[in-house]
Each structure stands twice: as structure tokens, then as C-alpha cells.
Amino acid sequence: MSDTKTITDTRGFGRKLADLDKTAVAPFLALAALFVLGALVNPNFLSIDNLLNVLTRSSFIAIIAIGATFVISAGGLDLSVGSMAALVAGIMILFLNSASIDGDVLMLAAGVAVAIGVGALAGLLNGAVITIGKIEPFIVTLGTMAIFRSVTVWLADGGSIAMKSIAMRNMFRPVYTGVFLGLPIPVWIIIAAGLLGAFILYKTSFGRHVIAVGSNEDVAKYSGIHVNRVRAMTYIIQGICVAIAVVVYVPRLGAATTTTGMLWELQAITAVVIGGTALRGGVGRIWGTICGAFMLEIVGNIMVLSNIVSEYLIGAVQGTIIIIAMLVQRTLQKKK
Amino acid sequence: MSGNQTTRPATVPVLEARGIAKAFGPVEVLTDISLTIMPGEVHAIIGENGAGKSTLMKLLSGHLKPTRGTVAIDGEPVTFAGPVDAEHRGLVLVHQEILLAPDLTVAQNIFMGRELKRGLMVNDREMNRQSAEAVQSLGADIDPTTQISRLSIARRQLVQIARALQVPHRVVIFDEPTASLTPFETEALLKVIRDLRDKGVAILYISHRLPEVGAIADRITVLRDGKLVATREASQLQPVDMARLMVGRDMSKLYPEREDTASRQNVLEVANFNVPGYARDASFNLRKGEILGFAGLIGAGRTELLEGIVGLRTAHGEVKLNGKPVTFHTVRDSMAAGIVYLSEDRKGKGLLLSQDLRTNLTLATLEKFTRGPLIERRREDASLDKAVSDFDIRARRRDLLAGQLSGGNQQKLLLAKMMLLEPSIVIIDEPTRGIDIGTKEQIYKFIADLAKAGKSVIVISSEMQELIGICHRILVMRSARIVGEVTGDAMTEDEIVVYATGVKINEAELYSAGNA
């Protein structure tokens, strides 16, 4: 009965290297290829300054996409993140302008807390309607996307919401422009969010449940997993990630406008998908996602640095990349 | 509509398999099968689950290509480009599963992909007329404009047959056509098959319902473990002989020695339990150490009743566990109380096919493998090692995905997963569906051992022999109600069928009708 020897032990490192999932490696190979392309197009591309600059600019999408990795690997979708970012930014700035707390530092800290609270609530709204209402995530978040955007426009009275206090602006700005141990603060935030996201998704039972729900909801249910709770939680995580991205975004311009976060949902989903996460759920790759967000920004950067293709076509190039990425994924999966 | 009726000498087989074999990867599932099907003959293929019946059918109907050997039509070797090619040559397969679009009408389904047109538009009136005729010729009266989703399973099956027979056909292959039919519907179908045969159509009929095969077949071929065991005239083979040939050994050895492990103590008492739409006023009890069977036709409500009890479906009624009233709002509650339910739908509800063995094994009990928020992979791996040896899970490698295991090993993995919950009551739905005979024996022994260890087991099964072989007591459900209980010597197929169908059936009479 105990014929365990027929089973090859796969815990050794050599084995692991040989079995390395090709879909997991592909995004990093693509990134390396972009580096080569960038270097060929313009020698300045590989300069540390340029790369750090690109990395900093990719931070909004990267952080939002970490949340989207949870939603998508649980089999969901969130189209509302761009509008949500605008709404969270608007409310955060309005709160900061209210100056209801003495002391700028305390005020900023409270502002960050408000942003994260609003983000979590917006995510909860999405999650609750999807799970309790049993409505397709696509439809629900299409609806909330319009709602969040419209409320922002209303709050901004059709214009923009700007931080009034110059002192607070100056104090907040380093969150986007500051450097710590040679790396820009937004990059540290990406790293921290990535580590935390990877820990939750790969090392905790909640993360395992996310993958189970995305893999097969019925099996998860029959295994005693609270499917609705897990799914709703992924949308809350998404909301919190949007809020963190906003905290990085607001100090950059000190304002939210009616077009803040426009089309971010598409970029975030693109980053997740080209990062190797399956759109049908059941597979989640946090580092792939971050790599994907970085790639999107690099493509733009290369287009600006070169004169081969007009940078107005950046959307077209990004669109092409997502389709190519899907084709590559499909091919790699077939080979398995 | 009707078959090609050219008369040809009955000595040339219309369809022939010459030493065909099929391997999936390194595993040969079918070895050197040679058989012939003559015009105007019903040739039955019987065999256990996993014997290779369905693979053989797929080879003969162009859905699969043989690894070795050839298929011949009218004595000429052919290679099918695919099922459509086979259909063009007059070979039609009636699938076991219902493959119809539920939202379309009967006529739209019958003509799907070959719609009749008038100019640019589809000719609905003509398709409806022809569909009505086609269905009528099968002895049924179904309005061709009815949506498929509003028909019973049996009627859907008839529509499917009508659709298959819409193309010119010389050989019709029926793959387990009666699996979900009542005896009366079965009889109607057998009549259709006899009519086809009398028109000179060759019929290949796959089933494991032996009396039915005896009634309809002219010749019978028995498959076992991918090999052809025998081809005989039906008149020379009694159902008992068929069973012995199918199993290849004494049937009595398949089941473990029955031991009287059931005590008097009730562990589970269910009273007036209702699962809306599926089960009404169900009352029963389960004793410590008892193996209790649930028999009945498919759709009788057995699965739904027990899913309701463990909290997987909306339900209401009294449930007492060890004498104390309990309510399970979710399946988590019943798991915590020591009751586990193993779904009949292993691939859809039991295991994550796209994940590895370890993930599947610990999915229901992850909290046992965590320290703080962290999953301890080392302990998961140790648990997998133990499960592999305790349950004899045979996997080539540890990192295989659950979907790459055979049906038997999937069932063992599912058992291992649920036993990690350390239950006192185990409910197993269709424990051996799609499982080879060797694994069946292991699973029966495992169930018997559970009872011996003082646990209680509920087995839901459509295989009456299996229930009779392992259970202490069998409850029979019909149309959402528990209608009978059989124990001891009364546990016979005849007795169960009487309760399951609500009629005393004289089998001989039923099956001989029209079999002149």
C-alpha cells in the first residue's frame, strides 16, 4: 500500500529550476527584451535616472494592479479603479482643505487614513453588490465606475479640487518626489505593497482561498470556504490599493481633476494580464503584475526617447502588447 | 430521415474494427480490438466503467484516431478526418450526455448547423414540420417550438436521437442511452432501436444494464480493462454470464466481508426534512458504525437531500446530532460538527483540477496547517506524504495537477482531503463512478473500515449492486420522497427497483415486448 517511492521528489532546487513555469518567467523575459530595445534606441535609456523616473511614474498603476491581481485571480474584475482613484483623491483633498485638525502632520496622517477608509468602503460596495446581489462583476463595476466618476465631477463642480494649504503641499510633496536610500519613495511603496501582496497571496490561507475561489467556486464552497467573504475581501483589498496609489498621486500635483485616473482600469488590467495572471482566475502573480506595470511605462518611455513611432500612438502599442501577451500565454499553456 | 436501405449481402460487415488500439501517452486504454457490425444487427458492447467502451465508440465514430489498427466500412479501410467525416459516411453517434442548446427550441436544435433556408432566411415552418415528424417517428409527441430547457431529461434524449437520425445513417451508435431513463422510457427507446434495426440499420449499443442488453442485442461483445474478452450470440449469454465476463472474477470478492458494525445508538436523526424542489418530508436515522445506502433513480432527490442536510442548500427540517438538535447554515457548520460530504461531481465540486495535490489536500483544513497567518508548507508536504501512503494515491510526481490523476486517484485524494477533517459521519455520493475495478475494491474496503472504526457512513449510489454489497441498510427515494427501506435478505435489486420506480415490474415481460 505505501508505495511512496514511485513518486519523484520535486522539492529539490534542480527539479524546481527545470520545472519553472514558463508563463511565470515570460513577463521578465519580455521586460529584458524591452531593456535591450530601449538601449538600442537611445543610450540614455539605461541611465539610472531615467529608469528610476520610469519606475516612479509606473507606481500608480503598479500599486492599483497589485490589488487587481487579487480580484482577477479570484475570478473577478474591477473596472471602477480609475474613477475610484479620482473620487478618493477628491475626498482626501476636500478633507485636507477642511483643516479640521490642528497641526499639518496630524492632518496629513488623518487625510491618508480617510483616503484608505474611502477606498476600502468603495471596494466593499463593489464586493457587496457583486456577492449579495449575484451580479456579474463586469456590470457592477461598470456601474460604480460611472457613479464614482460622476460624484467626483459633482464634488469638483466640473473643475478641479486643489489642496489649498501651501505649507501642507510642501510637506506632502516628498511622498512623490522624495528619495530614501537612493530609491524614490514611490518605488519603496511599490516594493512594500508587492511584498505584502505576495505574502498574503502566497503564504496565508486567505491567499490560498482566493486562488481556490478563482479556480473553481463550487469546489471552494464544498470545501467549506466562505466564497462570498473571500470575493468581497478581494474588492476591499483593491480599494485599499487604489487609496495607496492616491496617496502617492496627490502630492505630485496637489489636485484632483475630472480626468484623474482616466483609463487607469485598462492599464491596471493590462499590467495584471501581461504579468501572467489568468483572466479566468485561479492563478495570481504579484511580481509579474509589477513587472507588467513597469513594462507599460517603459514602452511609453521608449516611444518618447525614440522618433520611430509617434508617442500619440502609445495606446495602440499598449493595446497590441496585451493581445500579444495573451497569445504567448495561450501558446505556453498548450505546450504544458 | 430513414436509413439507406440498399440491400447488400449480410455477410459484409457495414462497420469493422481490425485490431485497433488506443494509447493516451504511455497508457494503452484499448488493446487490439477486432469486431464486426452487420446491417440489421444490434451489437451490444458491455463492460465495467473504465473498460474502454467509450473510447472504442469514439474510435469508431471518428472522434479519436486509433494508435494502431484500422476501421473498415463495407470491408474498405477508412481513416476518418473527424466526427463530421464519419457522419458523411453514415456513422452516427448518439452521445451519452445531452448536447443541446437549452435556450433554443426543439426544431432549432434538431436542425442546428444545417438549418433549412428559404432565400436568405431560415425556413422555420418547414423545420418545425420536419422536426414534429422526426419526433413522432420516435414515438413521442413534442411540440417542436418548445424550448429544450422545459423538457424532461428523457424527452431531451429523444430530441437528441432525432437530431442524430436527421442525417442519412447506416450505423447508429448509442452510448449508454438509458442511463437517465425510467423503465417505461427505456422500453420506448428500445422499440425505436428495434424499428431502426428492422429497416436494416446497424446498431452499436453500449450499456452496462445487463437485462436490457439481453433484451435488445443480437450479439454481445464484452470488454474488460481495454481488452476484448468475448463476442457471443445474445441468446447464449445470460446476465449472470455477462457479469462474470465483465468483471473477470467472482463478484462476491469485490466487496469486503460484511460485518455487523452498526450499533443501536443513533448518531444522526433527521425528521420532516425539506429541500425545496428536491426533497419532501424526509425522515431517517443513522446509527453509529452503520453503512446506510441511498438508492433511487437519477433525479430522485438523493444528492439534494443530503446536500441540504449538510448546509449546502437552502433547506428546513429537524436534524439531531447525537440527540442534540442542530442547524447547519453553511457547510462549514456541518464540517465543524464532524459531518463531511463528498460530492458525486468530483471534477466540478470536489477538486481543483488546475491546482496541485498539496493545495487540494489541505483546502478544507488550511487552519490546521497555519501558524499565525502563515501556511507551513513543510507540514502540508508531510500530510501529503501520509495521504499518499494511507490512501494509496498513485501519482507519477508530487507536483502533478489534480486534473492529471485518474478518476480512482482523484477519488482517493478527495477522500484524503475530507478525512483530514476527522469526521464522525461520512457521506459519499457515487463513490465509485468512473473508477476502475481495482480501486473500487479499495474504496469499498475503506468504507467498511470506517464503519469498523465506529464512524457512520452514508453512501448514495445508482449502482444497486454496490449498495447491496456494502450497506447494512438501504433507503430508496422516488420523486423527492423516501419511499422504502430494505435490510438484510430483502436487499435485492428487484426489491429496490419496485420502490425506486413505484411499480412492480415483471422484467421478463417488459423486455420481451416486441422482441420477436
Image (cartoon, rainbow, N blue to C red):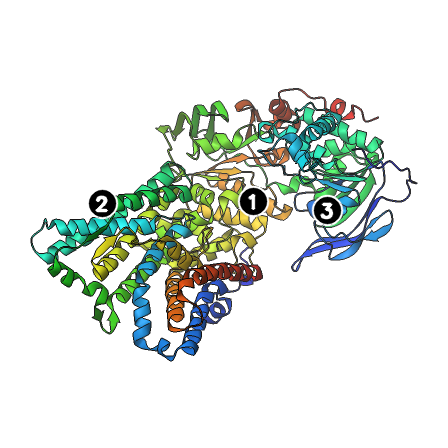
Tell me the subunit letter for badge 2: A
Q: Earlier in the sequence, mark 3 or mark 1?
A: 3
Q: Nearer the viewer, residue B319 or B176?
A: B176
Element at badge 3? helix
Residue A204 quadrant: bottom left
Q: Which residue shows up at 11% across the image and 58% down it?
A: A105
Q: In this view, does A252 lie to the left or right of B153?
A: left
Element at badge 1? helix
- Across and down, in percent, residue A193 comes to 30, 60
* Viewer can see residue B224: no
Farthest-out residue, right: B9
Residue that mark 3 sits on: B84
Q: Mark 2 against mark 3, which lies toward the viewer? A: 2
Q: Which residue shows up at 30% across the image and 70% down it?
A: A53
Q: Nearer the viewer, residue B116 or B98?
A: B116
Q: In this view, does B371 lie to the left or right of A3?
A: left
Q: Which amino acid does label 2 sit on?
A: Leu
Circle 3 packing at 10 Å, graded few (<14), some (14-19), many (20+), is some
